Amino acid sequence: MVSRSRLWRAVLAACLIAAAPIGLAAGPAQGHNGCQQPSGIRIVTSPNRGELSPGAPPLVVDVHTTLFFTGIAHAGYPSHWGFYDPVTQRRFFRSTGPAEGNCVIRYEPEAVPAGVIGVGTYQVWAIYVRWEDHSHIETSVLVGTLVVNP
Amino acid sequence: MKRRLRSILAVTLAVTVATMVVPAAPAAAESEVICVGSPIPAGWIHTTSLSTSFVCGGGVVPPNIVTQWVITNISQAKRDDVFAMCIDPNIPVPTGWVEISRAVMWFVCGYLLPGQGAPPNERLIKCLTCPVRPPDPPAPTPIRGAFDAVTNTGTIVGWAQDTGRPGQSLNIHYYVDGPAGIGVFAGEGLADVRRDDIQPGSHGLKFTLPAQWFDARMHSIYAYGIDATGDPPALLPGSPRMFILPKQPIGFLERIEPAGNAVGWTLDPSLFGYGNVNSVDFLIDGFFVARVPANGPRPDVNQSLGYPADHGYRWPIPQQFRDGVEHTLTARANDLTGDEPRELPGSPKRFTLNRRTAAVDVDGDYRSDIAVWRPGTGAWWYRPSTNPPGHMVVAFGQSGDKPLAGDYDGDRRTDQAVFRAGIWYIQPSTGGFQAVSFGLPGDKPVPGDYDGDGRTDIAVFRPSDTLWYIMPSTGNGSFYAVQYGISTDRPVPGDYDGDGKTDIAVYRPIFGAWFVHQSSNNQDTTVQFGLSSDRVVQADYDGDGRTDLAVFRPSNGTWHISQSIDGRYRAESYGLSADQAAPADYDGDGRADLAVFRPGNGTWYIRQSSDGTDVITQFGSPGDIAVAGVLVE
């Protein structure tokens, strides 16, 4: 039965190797050892007009400004952003890519020209999963006010 | 390590070759490697051979020397399973199995290289006594669909269909602020709205979020289709969707029209409010003045925001604030579900308005005075509203004249005027006398403020050539002509567009149709409203500064009014068939009152728009002609 044991080990190894890519792609990563900074989300701008994060003063930009969505969140989970102008009832939603293994939501792919959102005064909301929260509950936060001028 | 590696490679090679040459064999059969000559357990067969050095007691062996057998467990085989087994001396076909063929197969059962004339080394066996293989489980039939959006009204948009039962509508479960197991269960609903693009059956999502989610916060929502054929619930593509549903009333105070109407819209966007009529509180100079329903049609709001029902308002600012002094108007929308009222965007607005001149106003108090013209004597009899019991008599005109009261001198007081065979005779309240030749004997006089300067202009409609001849008071005696209408039309001039200028307009009795040439944009409008036997009584009944289409139906004494303020229809019985309709703003609230003069007994009947009460007063004699703000033929 030595040979039988070898055969099983070979089969098991083959199965693991074959299943590994599926496992990696199927769900968020579980570890947070690499986060090293508290969860939080923010909008940064280019050219630099300041940034918007919870507690910050209103961010005022023009339609030519590019907004970038970034932050620290649970690895593998995206952040969702919502802009709501209660006067015009205009809304704009955007979801980022998932936070990477170091919990960083890379800002480079998350560029949105302010002109796409449109002129107005918006309440900016964000939904994300804090890495400190192991139950994976979504956190909805009023980030602040964004003013988009012509 | 080398042995292990060789063993693995050998097994892999053997399994691969066996699979290639015997495709009918079950892929999941258990295999083992044993030394040559070892007993083969019951229920196992020898399926191929290996040549491996340093195993089974041997040293280095050439590749054509068999050192091991690969045996395969066939005890779990099912009927009609076919296996390939090596042909070995003294190893029979297992009990219950039969040999169905023999073959020479290279690279298995000890034959490592192809060669000529070799005897068969492999037999195909088939089980006759094994249990019948159960039918294959049904293939999964996953749900397909899409979660497209959450509308402003909190309604889910999308579709879902089980490919296994494409005609059956699915139940959908919704979770807010997280997926199932983490988020809050927000409800469920059958996706049974018919969509022609998703057939067969009805698969459109139909679910409105509960009121608790109308809270002006951002949430995520996940939609799961509950499979009709037992497959696991499926998260609909497009999930999660984000949504923000407003809590407080929304809307605008858009503008104050030149005619003095506050215009805008508002609605309560909460689940229980968006289809209902909201109301607006108007404050002027900080003090509450009126609560007005926002129930006028606003198709642009319906279309752009997706809310049903009517939510517009047009509120005429009351007369007491039309005093030439600047005021501040604030519109505050109420909330139908008990939330805080909200000052509408666009507030506050400043305005300065002047009162509108009443149709017949000899005392200058902006209220129409009761007046008759007595053809026999040419006397104008007035009952000034500032001195109700008293009266005033002015002799001007003669039998056969057409009395045409108006403010020809612009002093906001009514002047006497008559039209006689192409001659206008005017007695301005500021004094003097004018006789102006303008028109022909068969013309119909149509005085009005066509240039918007506050003074009545002389004008006639000539049925013979359907031309309107207008002499603006600002034109220093010049005039212009406009073709409009046909010879049988009744001229019905009025300020239908509210720009402060009289519009050319006709009523065509044969169709009951109104044709209006709007002075504000030179556009023509056509509306069917009335019957051929009706009398036209156009006036501003709703107080929005625009003339309303209106007729008086003598057959039953009914007034029919198309209100310009909200497009709604109003009907009210008031008067008898022989009465003369004389609508005007007698109570000074800015709205024309229903009123008739009954020549038979010289009595006026006025239903005041300000409070709905009737004023009945005797003034005039049989044969008198009521003088009011409308030309009644």
Image (tube, coloured by chain):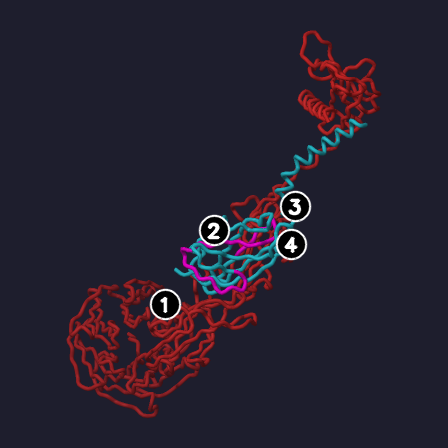
Q: Are marks 3 and 1 in contact (CB under 8 Å)?
A: no
Residue for badge 1 = B530
At x 27% / y 63%, what residue is drawn? B522
Q: Secondary structure at mark 2?
A: strand
Q: What numbered label is drawn on residue A136?
A: 4
Closer to viewer: mark 2 or mark 3: 2
B309 left or right of A77? Answer: left
Residue at numbered disc 2: A111
- Toward the bottom, the furthest residue is B390
- Chain letter, red: B
**Circle nearer the viewer, 4 or 1:** 4
- Residue furthest out toward the top: B117
Please check whether the numbered discs 3 and 1 fall on a single chain.
yes
Q: Nearer the viewer, mark 2 or mark 1?
A: 2
What residue span does the magenta drawing correspond to? A53-81
- Where residue B373 appears, as percent x and y from the top left, is 26, 84
On the image, numbered disc 3 is attached to which residue? B228
